[in-house]
């Protein structure tokens, strides 16, 4: 048995984010022997949606900037910052990854440092075989990723409704086009994460734990200010440590176990050397999504086992607007179906959301689309629950104005 331990660094961040990232990278073994003058390096932040740095929903641009500067010191042949945002971010006339990169401040950072940004959703893609696949025998990967020798995954720390946590391994979903992202949810997200990482495993990972997200990722209620960063050459070990920082045990995160059993890294805490700030000292249990749904929307039932972020994010936005309009009580008795619809479903009051659940179309109010539009979801839910939709839309506008004002003030 291999007794070598994986090293994971955990560093508390003071005023200087770059200094903390540098320290974390050095404590985890540095990049010197990973990146040579011939290396083509991909830096992969998590910018799944159109959100500002500082919200905890996307990787903070200051962390991406620090990582990029440290990589630049190695003078590699090429550096690219690449991301393919979540399902639904492949409609340039509506929303795409570039808009998300811009909103997060990542594009501005890349321009400042003279590094190109690539929309991996709109890149060309090649189908790659997954040896010993668990569920994805082949997977389409962006050409820029396949042409990189060194991949640095830079996730933000969040709990996740489907995969318990989303860190450096799940962050790799962004290298697949929208259709493959959808497929990964249908086949079994956690198994698909292991398959994906067996062909594009990050060589190094740096986690942004400045602000994390718990529960339903509702801003600002679900933000958790942690003020930490971490790094490792073993992304499985890094995710294992930062899952525990969020109060999630390794046994609860199936993709960590699948990745470990495929030999992609070490998830077992006994075989990880966590250096720097003690995990027990910074540990802060994050609330899980369903715990928050139950407490925040007690009368609402959600059937969303196999839904991907495309549907869940849009639906959660609807919930936020309804809560702001103080109409949560009216959701009592409503069941919302998203993702693959159950074979036998016979609710009394229900709204069915998204293409995956269309077999229930005609029996219940249905919102088409993949992903469906948030305004249409809001409209149908309000109709089903006799909520004044204009009031809800008014609250949505107020929220958007407040968020952009507040975050602009704090932006990088
Ligand atoms: S319909 Fe919804 S759950 Fe299905 S793939 Fe599209 S966004 Fe994902």
Image (cartoon, grey):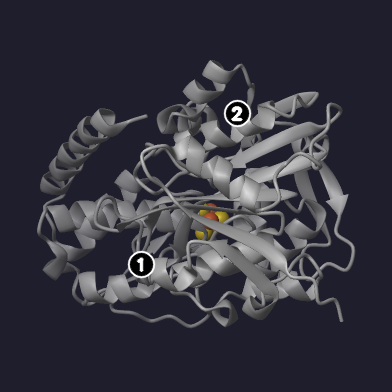
Residue 384's x, y, as percent?
22, 63
Q: Is mark 1 on a helix, strand or loop?
A: loop
Name the side, left or right, on which 121 lies relative to 137: left
Residue at image point 15% right, 38% down: 398
Q: Which residue is at the front of the view, 400 or 358?
A: 400
Q: In which quarter of the image is the C terminus?
A: top left
Name the side, left or right, on which 373 lies relative to 266: left
Q: Which residue is at the front of the view, 346 or 312?
A: 312
* Residue indicated by mark 2: 69
Q: How far apart are marks 1 and 2 (CA)?
A: 53 Å
Marks 1 and 2: CB-CB under 8 Å? no
Residue 153's x, y, as percent?
64, 47
Q: Nearer the viewer, mark 1 or mark 2?
A: 2
Q: Which residue is at the front of the view, 149 or 357?
A: 149
Seen in the picture, residue 226 relative to 122 is either above or below; the reply is below
Q: In which quarter of the image is the N terminus?
A: bottom right
Name the side, left or right, on which 122 lies relative to 3: left
- For label 2, the crowd category at 10 Å Cα-Cα, with few meaning under 14, some 14 to 19 and many 20 or more, is some
Instruction: Tell me the number on the disc at residue 364.
Output: 1
Seen in the picture, residue 394 relative to 111 is either above or below; the reply is below
Q: Earlier in the sequence, mark 1 or mark 2?
A: 2
Residue 87's x, y, as percent?
54, 47
């Amino acid at each position: 048995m291999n007794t070598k331990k994986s090293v994971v660094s955990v560093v508390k961040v003071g005023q200087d984010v770059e200094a903390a990232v540098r320290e974390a990278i050095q404590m985890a073994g540095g990049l010197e022997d990973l990146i040579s003058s011939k290396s083509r390096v991909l830096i992969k932040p998590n910018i799944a949606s159109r959100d500002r740095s500082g919200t905890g929903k996307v990787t903070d641009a200051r962390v991406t900037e620090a990582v990029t500067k440290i990589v630049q010191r190695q003078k590699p042949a090429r550096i690219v910052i690449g991301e393919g945002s979540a399902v639904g971010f492949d409609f340039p006339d509506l929303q795409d990854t570039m808009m998300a990169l811009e909103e997060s401040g990542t594009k501005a950072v890349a321009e400042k440092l003279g590094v190109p940004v690539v929309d991996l959703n709109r890149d060309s893609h090649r189908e790659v075989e997954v040896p010993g696949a668990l569920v994805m025998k082949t997977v389409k990967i962006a050409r820029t990723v396949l042409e990189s020798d060194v991949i640095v995954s830079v996730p933000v720390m969040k709990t996740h409704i489907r995969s318990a946590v989303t860190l450096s391994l799940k962050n790799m979903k962004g290298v697949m086009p929208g259709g493959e992202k959808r497929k990964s949810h249908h086949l079994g997200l956690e198994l698909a994460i292991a398959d994906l990482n067996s062909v594009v495993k990050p060589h190094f990972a740096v986690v942004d734990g400045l602000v994390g997200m718990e529960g339903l990722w509702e801003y600002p209620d679900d933000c958790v200010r942690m003020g930490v960063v971490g790094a490792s050459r073993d992304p499985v070990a890094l995710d294992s440590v930062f899952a525990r920082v969020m109060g999630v045990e390794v046994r609860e995160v199936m993709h960590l176990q699948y990745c470990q059993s495929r030999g992609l890294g070490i998830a077992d805490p006994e075989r990880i050397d966590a250096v720097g700030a003690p995990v027990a000292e910074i540990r802060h249990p994050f609330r899980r999504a369903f715990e928050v749904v139950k407490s925040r929307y007690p009368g609402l039932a959600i059937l969303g086992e196999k839904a991907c972020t495309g549907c869940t994010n849009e639906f959660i936005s609807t919930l936020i607007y309804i809560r702001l309009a103080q109409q949560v009580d009216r959701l009592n008795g409503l069941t919302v179906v998203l993702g693959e619809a159950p074979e036998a479903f016979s609710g009394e009051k229900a709204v069915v959301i998204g293409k995956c659940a269309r077999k229930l179309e005609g029996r219940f109010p249905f919102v088409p689309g993949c992903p469906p539009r948030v305004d249409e979801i809001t409209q149908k839910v309000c109709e089903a629950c006799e909520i004044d939709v204009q009031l809800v839309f008014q609250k949505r506008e107020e929220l958007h104005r407040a968020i952009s004002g507040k975050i602009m003030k704090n932006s990088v």
